[in-house]
Image (spheres, rainbow, N blue to C red):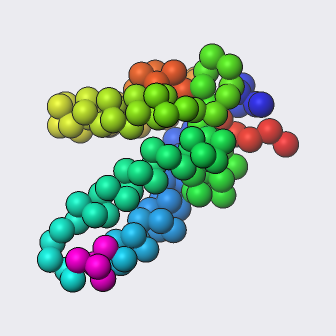
């Protein structure tokens, strides 16, 4: 496990874009077909939430975008993939903080990934995780 090579802002951003294109767009199309375009986007929201919550647990810290980019989420304490509790902290608790601060904490997180040496953001600190490059 290579926990000493943190992934920076641009590679993490690229992985997020890939996840949105590869997973988000098809989910939106499927939801549109099943709901008939009635504005019930909660179906897409629920499926996207489950994807971001469960995929790293079931796939050793990867999402599809992270896998393509060669990065993954690991726990800082032992370098192991995140579990359910870790991902709930990373997604739910941090999502609430981002919402309460009206997105300001999200912007601060992006800046943290860009300027901190360890490249950890607010959600990484809350969950005790880091995003690292895969070893060779």
- The rendered magenta stretch, by its main secondary structure, is classed as helix
Q: Is residue 10 magenta?
A: no
Residue 35, compared with residue 71, is above or below; it is below
Left or right: residue 26 versus residue 18 is left
- First to last magenta residue range: 31-35
Residue 85, compared with residue 134, is above or below; it is above
Residue at x 66% of width, y 53% of height: 67
Residue at x 77% of width, y 31% of height: 1
Q: Position of residue 60 (x, y in %)?
A: 66, 42
Q: Position of residue 16 (x, y in %)?
A: 48, 53
Instruction: Please tell me which residue lies in front, 43 or 134.
Output: 43
Residue 126, compared with residue 5, is above or below; it is above
Instruction: Please tell me which residue lies in front, 119 or 18.
Output: 18
**Number of numbered callouts drawn:** 0
Q: Is residue 90 visible?
A: no
- Residue furthest right in the image: 136
């Amino acid at each position: 496990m290579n926990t000493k090579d943190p992934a920076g802002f641009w590679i993490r951003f690229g992985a997020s874009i890939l996840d949105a294109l590869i997973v988000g767009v098809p989910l939106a199309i499927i939801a549109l077909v099943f709901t008939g375009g009635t504005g019930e986007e909660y179906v897409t929201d629920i499926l996207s939430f489950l994807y971001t919550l469960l995929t790293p647990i079931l796939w050793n810290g990867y999402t599809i975008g992270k896998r393509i980019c060669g990065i993954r989420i690991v726990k800082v304490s032992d370098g192991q993939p995140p579990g359910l509790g870790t991902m709930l902290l990373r997604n739910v608790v941090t999502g609430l903080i981002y919402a309460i601060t009206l997105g300001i904490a999200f912007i601060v997180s992006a800046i943290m990934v860009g300027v901190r040496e360890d490249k950890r953001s607010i959600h990484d600190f809350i969950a005790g995780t880091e995003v690292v490059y895969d070893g060779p």
